[in-house]
Image: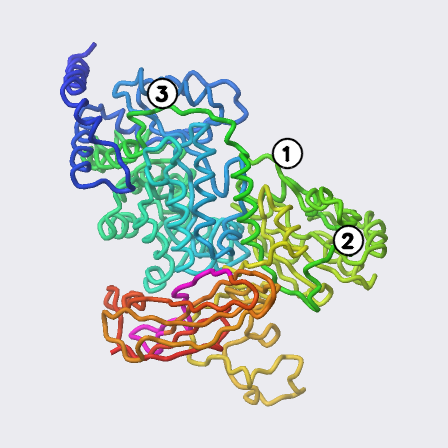
Amino acid sequence: MDTNLKKRKSYNWLYLVCIVPYLITSCSTKTPRDSSEKKDVLELKIDSIVASMSLEEKIGQTAQRGKSSRVKELPSELKEAVRKGEIGSFLNIMDKNDAKELQRIAVEESPSKIPLIFARDVIHGFKTIFPIPLGQAASFNPQIVKEGSRIAATEASTSGIRWTFAPMLDISRDPRWGRIAESAGEDPYLTSIMAKAYINGFQGDDLSSPTSIAACAKHFIGYGAAEGGRDYNTANINENSLHNTYLKPFKAAVDAGSATFMTSFNDLNGVPASANKYILKDILRDKWGFDGFVVSDWNSIIEMVNHGFAKDQKEAAKKAANAMLDMEMTSTSYQDHMKTLIEEKKFSEKELDVMVKNILRIKFRLGLFDNPYFDPKDDILYSEHHLSKAKEAALESTVLLKNNNNILPISKSKKIAIIGPLANAPHEQLGTWTFDGEKEHTVTPLDAFKKDESYKILYSDGLSYSRDKSNKKFAEAIQIARSSDVVLFFAGEEAILSGEAHSRANLNLPGAQEELINELQKTGKPIVLVIMAGRPITLGNILDRVDAVVMAWHPGTMGGPALKDIITGVVTPSGKLPVTWPKEVGQIPMHYNHKNTGRPVIPEEFVHMDSIPIAAWQSSLGNTSHYLDAGYLPQYPFGYGLSYTNFTYSDINISSKTPKMGDTITVSIKVTNNGEIKAKETVQLYFRDMVGSLTRPIKELLRFEKIELAGGESKTIDFQFSTEDLSFYGPDKKWITESGDFKVWVAKHAHDETNEIEFTLE
């Protein structure tokens, strides 16, 4: 044994004997952030561990590895790497025995006995699958989101998973982008609220609890702004938009105590996110004070070679390390080149120490040093409580978009034809990024209706899957439609058609679904279109052929019972759109909180291209910002969603029409349920800064509240906000609130301007 190793082992032994008994009682963390006293003790121990580590061990902590699902046995070289301290984290180790063995080697046989973190993409459920995140955002109910992520953490931790790569907080304004399904939509305020809910759910009240898992705010930053909605593409975001829109949810994640961050694949204004010092050091570390660790996305460090930002993997490692990206996912550029970079003084061991400390800090907060193992309690998977909460989430996520002649809800006296490729597709119903969900536990709409013998059901899928272009089953579907009183057509896209690397240029229903709907419409029977998809679907070809439209997103394990309850009126739909729904792809990107431009649309002067006279004089139609064919309105605006009852808003008031800087302002509104049934409504508060030193959006969501009212009941809602909530990132690169004129609206959706009030900030 060499002399240095003997000294290090001796130091470790003395340290353990003299210091650890005190530290064990002092390092437990009950909150996402450590108190000052606990933090001092924790940092002392981290410093001591790092001081005793070899360079190879330090580099090892920055390495995240995985095992191919095709390999059944745990490779001996993987065990040996852990034994040497050359791996800090694993992802996708789903064999519980493998996870236990790797952890045992790490804490019993590696030089510094540092535990591993096991990670997994637990995005919207582990075994019990909740609606996709875009669907959960449609609930406008952060409590639902928090409960869902708490359940996901509880289930995932039984397999040793203590770290999830969620939530995804990318602002998403382009439904062509497949990963819009993982987002909370287009609005920075709504996404910020959901960020806090996800993080609090995953991490719980005590991050060191065995049932808590570390959250990972991703993708930092600009991934949702990829050109053309093409995954992995470049993002060009000016500094104004970066701070006022895209960074806001990530700041909320830091404030909520997110343990980790993940960089995005894209380059941001020419600099790949995985080596972008401005966002990783200047903003995340220095300005926001984030003290967790940052992990790259899969291979994103070495992909900087493809970007043309690094000539080889060694240079890519250098640039990522100098930007303080702490951990490398799957690729090995740190492992292969870090030691040489330090020897060549292109990176310093002191900076590496900081990276390692960031990683160890989270391992301590997770309680892994005290309790590195896990309890495989399989009995909690798919528990009744978990399934009940999954159904509740699906209920509140569902959005009613159209309901002509109150065709919904459907009474028990009706004979129902259930048709469509998503009516009984248990795998597809789960949605994207559900590695561990099992279709055998999925309850489909057909299952739910069949279990209730009081309904008369006829069934034909009509199409074998969403992309099916064959009409061989049309005749059967048409026949049962003719024999029914109403058609429930379950349409949409398979789970694989949304998510990472699944962007679409055409957002119509795929396959022959539109063709089948057209044929069913000829029977004269009313059609209720229920959509299961990971994004808004353009409906221009069929919207006038159906009587009702229900957006169910991909609703998860309990989507079937939830949809049955909504369709039959057991529960009134309450979901609202978290993203603008375009009429057609040519309108994209389209979002409610856009700028006014110098020539905004004047509705009274708009002329559709079909109404333009032949040989019209060029200037006779006016010059405003719109499309001649698609107009200027979306199919459905942000925040839109119908109910089975009618809510009215009245008596809007503001606490002061001339508030002063620093004041708290209250806007109140009376909301009345004018129907006879109990229902929920999401009341939304928007504002506009009329004149600014930078142009401001025409509207911004400021607050929302979801309430439940019985038939005939009224309630006054008080929205409180500070003048700081009206601030923006200004031309001097500081957050400012400017005096002047403002408007606020209490509204049912972003285009509702019925209840408006003005004030002047002095």
Q: Are marks 2 and 1 in contact (CB under 8 Å)?
A: no
Q: Dot 2: what SS?
A: strand
Instruction: Locate residue 136, reporting x and y percent.
Output: 50, 51
Give, as a single range, the part of the protein colored magenta.
689-708
Q: Alpha-carbon neighbours of circle 2 within 10 Å: few (<14), some, or many (≥20)?
A: many
Which amino acid lies under the numbered mark 2 shown in the image of this protein?
Ile
Which amino acid lies under the numbered mark 3 shown in the image of this protein?
Ala
Q: Dot 3: what SS?
A: helix
Magenta highlight on residue 419: no
Q: Is residue 366 above or below residue 584?
A: above
| Circle count | 3
The structure's colour scheme is rainbow
Instruction: Locate residue 186, reporting x and y percent.
Output: 46, 60
Residue at (50, 66) in percent of width and height? 590
Instruction: Locate residue 232, reporting x and y percent.
Output: 46, 49
Q: Which residue is mark 1?
A: 440
Q: CA distance from mark 2 to mark 1?
A: 25 Å
Q: Which residue is mark 3?
A: 81
